Image (cartoon, rainbow, N blue to C red):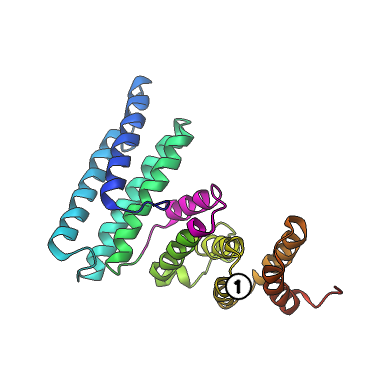
Amino acid sequence: MFLSVKLSEARVRHRQVSADIVTNYESRAPLATDQVTPSQLAEAIEQFFAVAIRIDREHGETGAVLNDDVSQIGDYGLQLLHDLANWAHQLALEDARHEIALVSLGAADWVIRHQGELRAPELVVDALANLANTTQDPDELKQIEQFMTAALKALTAVIQLDLEKTNPGRPWRVLHVNRAIVATRIQDPDTMIRVFDELERALPEEAPRFFAEGMAQMNKLDYPQHVRDVMEKYHDVWCGRTMH
């Protein structure tokens, strides 16, 4: 499966990438630091996976668990992964940072499966964007769009209020826009309409720019007519009808 979200696979991926980060960190003989070290983070992340896997085993992969428990555990795991990704960045290990982002998809999927809330979605958003940029296959893009949709539904109410409208990098905004781009690349009108309608409702201030840029891409990349027709409809609503 292109979009790998299995918890067991994420755990193996974590063990491999964290070992590389720890080795790199320790080889540089760092001075004493007040920060939590990569080895400490790796150990805590391993504990997160152990708890998550135990819950799956005891309650089933979609079994009933107190939502707040799932949300808190998921938030803990995703925050730890975020901190480890920051260490990878500080150590100039960008491939490792990318791997950690992919690990976060397993943690996020676990939260989603148990109907929890995603409270730390930054790495998840990054991973989905990176995956989308590595494929042109419609079926693989559909998997990514479906996960984006599930992640959006699991974002907390605080994030969904979208109070930081001056920050273009907020996860809520980025995920919506990226999902609309992915929907366009799938080239399925029904998917485009569903996602575009949700973009309009969630981020109306983003719509004119998105559909203007989308129409420009239609002309630049020579999209099929059935895809152009959908984009043109929304472009005319948000950007004004143009001569064709």
Left or right? Give the position of 58 relative to 86: left
Tell me if residue 25 comes above or below residue 102 in the rendering. Answer: above
Magenta segment: 118-141
Query: The residue tagged with tag 1: helix, strand or loop?
Result: helix
Residue reaching furthest right? 243
Q: Residues within 10 Å of mark 1 (few under 14, many from 20)?
A: some
Using the rendered image of the protein, determine whether residue 34 is visible from the camera's viewpoint: no
Residue 31 lies, in percent from the top left, at: 35, 23
Residue 95 vs 51, above or below: the answer is above
Q: Residue at x 76, y 56 (%)?
A: 220
Q: Nearer the viewer, residue 180 or 123?
A: 180
Name the residue: 41% across, 71% down: 153
Q: Is 105 contained in the magenta span?
A: no
Query: Label 1 amino acid?
Result: Pro
| Residue found at x 77% / y 61% | 219
> Which one is nearer the viewer's eye here, 6 or 114?
6
Image mark count: 1
Q: In this orientation, does residue 11 appear?
A: yes
Which quarter of the rendering shows the C terminus?
A: bottom right
Task: Name the residue tied to disc 1.
Answer: 189
Q: Quadrant of residue 28?
A: top left
Q: From the top left corner, tell me how far across and down residue 77 is, in percent.
A: 30, 51
Give the vertical position of 98 relative to 2 (above or below): above
Main SS of residues in magenta: helix
Residue 73 spot, x, y in % from top left:
25, 58
Q: Position of residue 94 (x, y in %)?
A: 48, 35
181 left or right, relative to 219: left
Q: In this rendered view, identify the residue nearer to me: 27 or 244.
A: 244
Is 124 magenta? The answer is yes
